[in-house]
Image: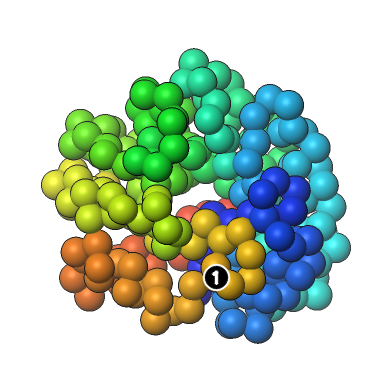
Amino acid sequence: MIDLHSHTFFSDGGLVPSEHLRRVETLGYQAIAITDHADSSNLEFLISHLRQAANDLNPLSSTRLIVGVELTHVPPPLIKGLSLQARALGAELVVVHGETPVEPVQPGTNRAAIDACVDILAHPGFISEEEAAMAAENGVLLELSGRKGHSLTNGHVAKMAKKAKAGLAINSDAHGPGDFLSAAMAEKVGLGAGLSKEGYLQVRSNMEALVSKIAAG
């Protein structure tokens, strides 16, 4: 298992990074990205503190802790600059909080994130086929979410991704210990969105490739 979107108490999650990592280690995870909610007010704080945790914990854990951020409700014109700043500060993974149907995310967020070539566009809601094609071209993975509410448009996202040949990721968006996905539940998220078994396996391959890229630096 790999999960590339989760939260600790540094934003609205419930666990410190050490417990967060230990919880998924006992579930047999290969890697977990902590991607707490970020904007210009807390970007440096989040990345510096999570990098310290990763430096301490990774040598002692069988699960790799990936240092990430989720740019959240950031106005579209600011997304590219904050994405570049996050990488310069040491973020290994940049996620953008997409245009989910259950929150008032500014229109244009999906397109701005794709233009910025972030790693993952989380729960992108009613993403257009044109935007999905841009994601395919820019190597941005579109998320199928295991989280209540955000998951409402998983079927639409999977359909647009298939049409555009865009890559997908399946993530928990975990905020607490009860949110982490088992391998069986992650597969159900994919199949429930309309993926074939082969399509689900491709999603896993996409995520493994991204983790390998991060590990290679």
Secondary structure of the residue carrying tag 1 is loop
Q: Which residue is outermost to the top?
A: 77
For disc 1, the marked residue is: 180
Q: Residues within 10 Å of mark 1 (few under 14, many from 20)?
A: many
In the figure, residue 88 lies in which quadrant?
top right
Q: How is the image coloured?
A: rainbow
Vertical relation: 127 (above or below) 35: above
Residue 59 percent coordinates (x, y) = 80, 70
Where on the picture, by quarter, is residue 46? top right
Residue at (52%, 57%) from the top-left corner?
A: 173
Task: Work out whether 102 lies above or below 3.
Answer: above
Q: Residue at x 22, y 34 (%)?
A: 128
Residue 2: x %, y % from top left: 51, 68
Say left or right for 35 vs 130: right
Side of 202 where 177 appears, left or right: right
Residue 209 shows in this picture: no
